[in-house]
Image (tube, rainbow, N blue to C red):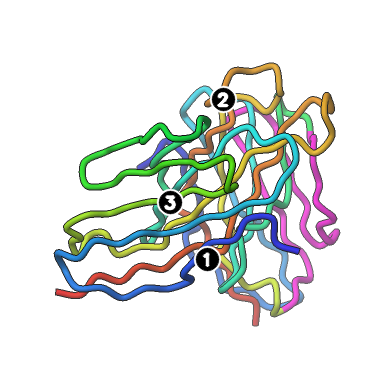
Amino acid sequence: ETGVTQTPRHLVMGMTNKKSLKCEQHLGHNAMYWYKQSAKKPLELMFVYNFKEQTENNSVPSRFSPECPNSSHLFLHLHTLQPEDSALYLCASSQDRRTVISLGANVLTFGAGSRLTVL
Amino acid sequence: EDKVVQSPLSLVVHEGDTVTLNCSYEVTNFRSLLWYKQEKKAPTFLFMLTSSGIEKKSGRLSSILDKKELSSILNITATQTGDSAIYLCAVEWEADSGAGSYQLTFGKGTKLSVIP
């Protein structure tokens, strides 16, 4: 375990379903991230939260809805997904996201991922 | 246009071989380059490089940054089957100077397979 826990590890859903992915970190970090990892593509940043505030949304479709109730928990709510959304969704955390912070504060600790299959 | 390019995309070697993985980048306001190892689960942090020519080493793995060439290499000596993984390179950079936060862009990764 890396200190970042993701559930569920595997999820199969139909296009009309509503489901949620959960991420919890026990590292005392202030920044949390959702990444999408598809085959033969670089890791794609989806959302960033720093001190519970969303600081980045990389043009992610509205069928993905993040929620960050506190610095330790991050959710990704899924609704009416498409088959091309099937991928590994990785949660990560880091100490901080701001430039004034020293080197190393932006080093990510990843969770093991949630493998999503949309039928 | 890819800002971080890794090569090769995949590599198959025999146990005991030495491998060199490459990462090149093209970003503004570079801050650091990071290497991660991803087996079947979470990518795990290997190295962070900020200065040219200074080798970081951990066991059989080592890495060095060349800021003039905008690139880095990751070396693995005496490879073992446990080294089989995807190796990810990521570059930390600031899109707009003074904007307040750094971006982190990943390459596609190099899939290394070590066969007995």
**Residue type for callout 2:** Ala
Q: Position of residue B90 (x, y in %)?
A: 56, 48
Cα gap from disc 1 to disc 3, whole angstroms: 30 Å
Q: Position of residue B101 (x, y in %)?
A: 75, 29
**Residue type for callout 1:** Arg
Apparent side of residue A35 relative to residue A113 in the rendered image (left or right)? right
Q: Which residues are magenta?
A: A54-82
Q: Which residue is mark 2?
A: A105
Which residue occupies the foreground of this view, B102 or A69? Answer: B102
Q: Which one is in front in this view, the residue at disc 2 or the one at disc 3?
A: 3
**Parent chain of label 1:** A
Q: Which one is in front in this view, the residue at disc 2 or the one at disc 1?
A: 2
Residue at 73% x, 42% y: name it.
Answer: A67
User: Dominant secondary structure of the magenta stretch?
Assistant: strand
Q: Which residue is mark 3?
A: B73
Q: Residues within 10 Å of mark 2 (few under 14, many from 20)?
A: some
Marks 2/3 same chain: no
